[in-house]
Image (cartoon, grey):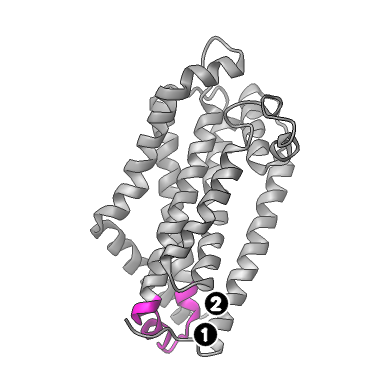
Amino acid sequence: MSNSVLAYTFATTRRLIIRFFRTMSNVTNTFLVPSIMFLIMRILFGDFIRTAQGTEALNLIPLCTLMVLGAQWMSFSYAAAESIRDRTSGLSGRVASLPSGPLPLFLGEFLYYVLRSVAAGLTVWIVGMICGMRMERPGTVVGFLLLILIGSLCTATLSALVSQLTDTPESLMALTPLLMCVLFLSGGLVSAEAYVSAVRPFVRNNPVTHVVVMLISLNDGAPERVGLCLLWALGIILVLGSLALLSFRRRWQHGRRPSHS
């Protein structure tokens, strides 16, 4: 990769980060909203989750896992909407017309997606620790950090893909119910056996369930499903990332420039 491509990539990311901190709604949706969501879940459903766990003290690891992923999945739609608005306003077209071509635009936006998702995930993790989440072993800390990083890569590939498939930010809301089903039809709040029989197979094989089981087992000192979680993550990143890159190339190679608004 040439120096000019790297320079324009980092310039694109820097521009997006500066705009992020200058836009109050972006800061609020990334840091404040996920924190409030975690606190609401902890206060309203803490006793219910503890009863379902069958323990005297509430284990916050499953809830924190769900809220980390939820915060990252929320950030995907906000970030993708920014890219769509840039493209429909003509800004992306002007950036892509620079000597380095459109590739730095794709890479710079992708890096921004990752950083934004990492920020959202770290925020929830820190709030979880403040609320009393106990991580008994170093492996649990490493597991959460990997969850935040790998989850951000998965979220970034999803953002990159959907931002190329539509020209209207409102259409991104169509994915929200699907993501919420994946998030909450899992073993994050209660075990798979607590669900009705019709959805138990989905809950047991849900990748979110695998992540929850992995982090709990790491905290207990007997790791489980680590390889399975990594395979799921690798598959998601490869599939969504490849589709995103193909969609991006097709859009720009075929000269599909959106009309200026």
Instruction: Compute the Cα span from label 1 to label 2.
Output: 6 Å
Taking the spot 34% from the left edge, 44% from the top edge, the residue there is: 31
Residue 181 visible (yes or no): yes
Location of the C terminus by quadrant is bottom left
Instruction: Tell me where residue 179 appears, x and y as whole percent.
Output: 56, 49
| Element under disc 2 | helix
28 lies left or right of 252: left
Front-most of residues 196 and 83? 196
Snapshot quadrant of residue 220: top right
Front-most of residues 2 and 259? 259
Residue 252: numbered disc? 1
Front-most of residues 72 and 137? 72
**Relative vertical location of residue 196 with respect to residue 180 in this rendering, above or below:** above
Taking the spot 50% from the left edge, 62% from the top edge, the residue there is: 159
Amino acid type shown at disc 1: Trp
Snapshot quadrant of residue 26: bottom left
Q: Indicate whether residue 208 is drawn in magenta.
A: no
Magenta portion: prevailing SS class:
helix
Taking the spot 56% from the left edge, 62% from the top edge, the residue there is: 157
Q: Are marks 1 and 2 in contact (CB under 8 Å)?
A: yes
Q: Which segment did they paint magenta?
A: 87-106
Instruction: Tell me where residue 105 appears, x and y as whole percent.
Output: 45, 76
User: Label 2: which residue?
Assistant: 248
Q: Residues within 10 Å of mark 2 (few under 14, many from 20)?
A: many
